[in-house]
Image: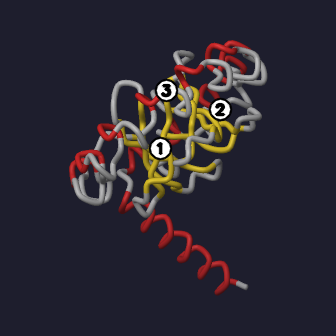
Amino acid sequence: MKKLAIGSAVLWCAAAACHAQMIPAQRNPLFNMKINPKFNTTINPRDNASINPKYDTEINPAYNASINPRYNSSLNPKYNSSVNPAYNSSINPKYNVELNPNYTSSVNPKANPGWTGLYCFDLKGDLQGFLIRASDRIILLFDKDLTWVGYAVENGGRGYNIFDLDGGWIGYYQGNSEGGLNRFTVDGEWVGYAS
């Protein structure tokens, strides 16, 4: 039993060290409790109603049409080509290599230790991907393997609406007090965060 416990501890340390090598400690929620909603209640929507769309209708697209892309066409890439990477090459990393971490090391968090974008995590604190700013209103979503998987459009309500590459609305980000974002499904379920 003692060998099993030691082996588990070694594996956990190895996994944490591998995870830490890619993310600077001050930006890693496993090492910095200030950016970990599990330990910082001010950035946890379960503990802070002012950042929880279930309790604050101003930040809930289901109750606030001005931040809902189904009702506000300026936020919807299916109706506004300026926020749709399929029609706006300046925000499309396939055509604008300055936004593509596979070709531009300055926006590649794996290659640039001074990278300033946001890391995306699930609720356990496991790395899911990265956010790269494409413009004042658009952020691009990449998975942890640097594959472009979606984009988000600023909604004017302290957050961003998230779309898949086909322009389907799949969720939204809302800001928190530490300069990060909490991720919610379209139905308002908290599923992750970016810091």
Q: Amino acid at mark 1?
A: Asn
User: Which is nearer the eye, 47 or 193?
Assistant: 193
Q: Residue 55 vs residue 18: left or right?
A: right
SS label for mark 2 = loop
User: Which is nearer the eye, 190 or 124?
Assistant: 190
Q: Which mark is residue 44?
A: 2
Q: Residue 55 vs residue 45: left or right?
A: right
Q: Residue 47 vs residue 155: left or right?
A: right
Label 1 and label 2: CA atoms lie apart by: 15 Å
Say which of marks 2 and 3 sits in front: 3
Color style of the picture: secondary structure
Say which of marks 1 and 2 sits in front: 2
Is mark 1 in CB contact (under 8 Å) with mark 3?
no
Residue occupying image coordinates x 35% and y 51%:
24
Q: Position of residue 18 (x, y in %)?
A: 43, 68
Q: Residues within 10 Å of mark 2 (few under 14, many from 20)?
A: many
The disc, 1 or 3, on the residue closer to the chain's N-terminal end is 1
Q: Amino acid at mark 3?
A: Asn
Q: Which mark is residue 80?
A: 3
Label 2 and label 3: CA atoms lie apart by: 33 Å
Q: Position of residue 177 (x, y in %)?
A: 52, 23
Label 1 and label 3: CA atoms lie apart by: 39 Å
Residue 147 figure quarter: bottom left
Q: Amino acid at mark 2?
A: Asn
Report which residue position mark 1 lands on.
32
The disc, 1 or 2, on the residue closer to the chain's N-terminal end is 1
SS label for mark 3 = loop
The disc, 2 or 3, on the residue closer to the chain's N-terminal end is 2
